[in-house]
Image: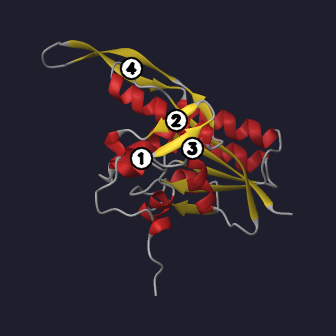
Amino acid sequence: MPERTAFYIDGFNLYHAINDLGANHLKWNSLWGLAQGLIQSRSQQLEKVVFCTAYYPGDTGKRARHERYIKAQRHHGVTIVMGHYVREDMSCRDCGHLWKKPTEKETDINVAISLIDDAHRDVFDHAYLVTNDSDQAATTKFFAQRFTTKKLTIVCPPGRIHSKHLLDASSHSLTLTTEHLEKSVMDHMIQAADGLIVRPHEYAPPPDWVHPKARAPRR
């Protein structure tokens, strides 16, 4: 029997890591395809991918891109868990200027709850947690103590360094690379059951970029 696997993704942790790479076309990726590329195809079976995120308020362009991306993820079988933003009061210590700062809420908790709940329901034998946020250290410690027969692999976003606090509770780790992301880049147009999903022009690849699936094999 293949080992059942599931992925739990901190959407903002992954997004900001990809954004820092300076290659916007890598943002248009299939999270299900990304997970498939990380597991062992012969000995593991992908059961579930959970993506925890929230819509940023006030920026209509960003919201539209985010909605299109989430629609594409759902089409590929990804479970979406939404958080939200709140506007917190901020002030400048020097001049006293006041403003409202959008602050993301719930994503960390949604990742933790999804992972632990699915472990209780025996959805997987091996979980992959995609984040380098040390706030999840309590989650990984609880998982290691409670689910001694299950495995947990910490997956570090590209260009980031693994959190030691996360690794302390897991003996398994991976690091996402640009190559992993390139292989999971989605098509320009995706025919979903409820309509056509078109890639935002901001995520178009460079003119000379060729998808790994279409590249000539190495000799």
Mark 4 in CB contact with mark 2 (< 8 angstroms): no
| Closer mark to the observer between disc 4 and disc 2 | 2
**Amino acid under label 3?**
Ile
User: Counting residues from the N terminus, which is met first, the one under dot 4 or under dot 2?
Assistant: 4
Residue 50 quadrant: top right
Q: Looking at the image, is 70 positioned above or below residue 188? A: above
Q: Secondary structure at mark 2?
A: strand
Task: For marks 4 and 3, give the CA distance.
Answer: 21 Å
User: Counting residues from the N terminus, which is met first, the one under dot 4 or under dot 3?
Assistant: 3
- Count of marks, rendered view: 4
- Residue lying farthest to the right in this orientation: 1
User: Residue 175, position in %: x, y?
Assistant: 50, 61
Dot 2 corresponds to which residue? 196
**Amino acid under label 4?**
Pro
**Amino acid under label 2?**
Leu
User: Residue 82, position in %: x, y?
Assistant: 56, 27
Q: Which mark is residue 161?
A: none
Q: Looking at the image, is 70 positioned above or below residue 157? A: above
User: Counting residues from the N terminus, which is met first, the one under dot 1 or under dot 4?
Assistant: 1
| Closer mark to the observer between disc 1 and disc 4 | 1
Dot 1 corresponds to which residue? 27
Task: For marks 2 and 3, give the CA distance.
Answer: 25 Å
Mark 3 in CB contact with mark 1 (< 8 angstroms): no
User: Residue 61, position in %: x, y?
Assistant: 33, 27
Q: Looking at the image, is 14 positioned above or below residue 95? A: below
Mark 1 in CB contact with mark 4 (< 8 angstroms): no
User: Counting residues from the N terminus, which is met first, the one under dot 3 or under dot 1?
Assistant: 3
Lateral position of residue 31 relative to residue 15, left or right: right
Nearest the viewer among 153 and 1 is 1
User: Residue 68, position in %: x, y?
Assistant: 47, 33
**Amino acid under label 1?**
Lys
Dot 3 corresponds to which residue? 9
